[in-house]
């Protein structure tokens, strides 16, 4: 089954063949016109996401010269060309899908649970995460609400803005985090900030980091870079997260001496367990470790939590 925008989706009775419901296709989610579709139903004027069943067919309308006619039932549509946004038919997620999947995994939610919260089919959520997609505004808002974020955040609208521009909670509380909570939020890896002293003054720079077995924080840099100024000194390392939608957040601060990792076996282990290469790119093969001697953290949350 394939369709163009403006075609009619018709649902027929399997017994009599009479039309039970019809509507205009107002949204396509595949470049080649295959389902699912956003349909504006003629009886309610509501738009819903539809995965057509065997009782449905597309009634094509005239689309003007030069528009390729979609294949019709029974004309070999099983041999359709791959989705244009997915070369060779392989998964090709867009920025929206990557943000949705990352936020869902960060919150420890399954696709099934997220889809239930958003009121959408799990298969459609899988499609959003794995293909280049453009969901309806209503669907995106429901999905953002299910993930505790905003539609703008899922679309990357705030990528060039500093976090935390929303309003403060009505009754916030600032509470200290214990050592175990701090270590849990440091987790195993991520992006944090290292504060170092340089001849020009104090500097804070972001780095990709790993937490190793003894609780030390390690990051990869270049010998002539600003983060390399940390070696041989006591430094501060900070990691945080801001929940824009809920006006909540936390931060963890680790303070301790930094040293260059020179033992070949230790360097090899760090390279093997690294979750990513440094985001800035370039030659960054020098590992620096920070052994926390003070580990503190704070969390902003509602007063009743």
Image (cartoon, grey):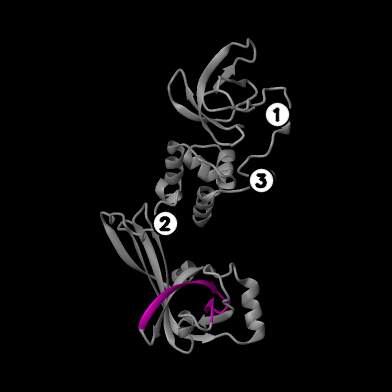
Pointer 2 residue: 159
Residue 240, image x, y percentages? 41, 66
Pointer 1 residue: 77
Kindly report which numbered mark, 1 or 3, lies closer to the viewer in this rendering: 3
Tell me if residue 32 comes above or below residue 208 in the rendering: above
Residue drawn 60% across and 71% down? 274
Of 33 and 174, nearer the camera is 33
Q: Disc number at residue 87?
A: 3
Asked whether, in this view, residue 80 is left or right of residue 299, the answer is right
Tell me if residue 64 comes above or below residue 239 in the rendering: above
Q: CA distance from mark 2 to mark 3?
A: 28 Å
Q: CA distance from mark 1 to mark 3?
A: 18 Å
Q: Secondary structure at mark 1?
A: helix
Q: Secondary structure at mark 2?
A: loop
Task: Magenta stretch: give its range.
Answer: 201-222
Residue 291, image x, y percentages? 49, 83
Of 159 and 113, nearer the camera is 159
Of the residues under marks 2 and 3, which one precedes in the sequence?
Answer: 3
Residue drawn 56% across and 27% down? 4
């Amino acid at each position: 089954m394939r369709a163009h925008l403006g075609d009619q989706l018709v649902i027929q009775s399997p017994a009599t063949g009479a039309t039970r419901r019809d509507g205009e296709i107002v949204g396509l989610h595949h470049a080649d016109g295959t389902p699912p579709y956003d349909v504006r139903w003629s009886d309610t004027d509501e738009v819903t996401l539809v995965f057509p069943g065997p009782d449905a067919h597309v009634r094509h309308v005239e689309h003007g010269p030069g528009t390729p006619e979609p294949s019709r039932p029974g004309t070999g549509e099983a041999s359709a060309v791959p989705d244009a946004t997915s070369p060779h038919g392989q998964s090709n997620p867009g920025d929206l899908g990557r943000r949705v999947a990352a936020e869902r995994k960060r919150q420890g939610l399954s696709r099934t649970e997220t889809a239930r919260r958003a009121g959408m089919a799990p298969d459609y959520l899988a499609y959003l995460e794995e293909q280049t997609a453009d969901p309806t505004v209503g669907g995106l808002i429901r999905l953002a609400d299910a993930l505790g974020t905003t539609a703008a955040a899922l679309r990357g609208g705030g990528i060039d803005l500093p976090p935390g521009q929303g309003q403060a909670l009505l009754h916030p509380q600032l509470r200290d985090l214990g050592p175990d909570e701090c270590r849990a939020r440091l987790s195993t890896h991520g992006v944090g900030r290292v504060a170092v002293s340089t001849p020009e003054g104090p500097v804070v720079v972001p780095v990709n980091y790993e937490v190793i077995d003894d609780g030390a924080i390690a990051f990869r840099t270049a010998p002539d870079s600003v983060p390399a100024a940390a070696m041989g000194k006591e430094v501060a390392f900070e990691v945080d997260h801001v929940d824009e939608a809920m006006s909540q957040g936390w931060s963890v601060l680790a303070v301790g001496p930094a040293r260059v990792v020179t033992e070949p076996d230790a360097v090899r282990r760090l390279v093997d367990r690294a979750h990513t290469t440094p985001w800035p790119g370039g030659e960054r093969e020098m590992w620096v470790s920070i052994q926390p001697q003070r580990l503190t953290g704070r969390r902003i949350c509602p007063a009743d939590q």
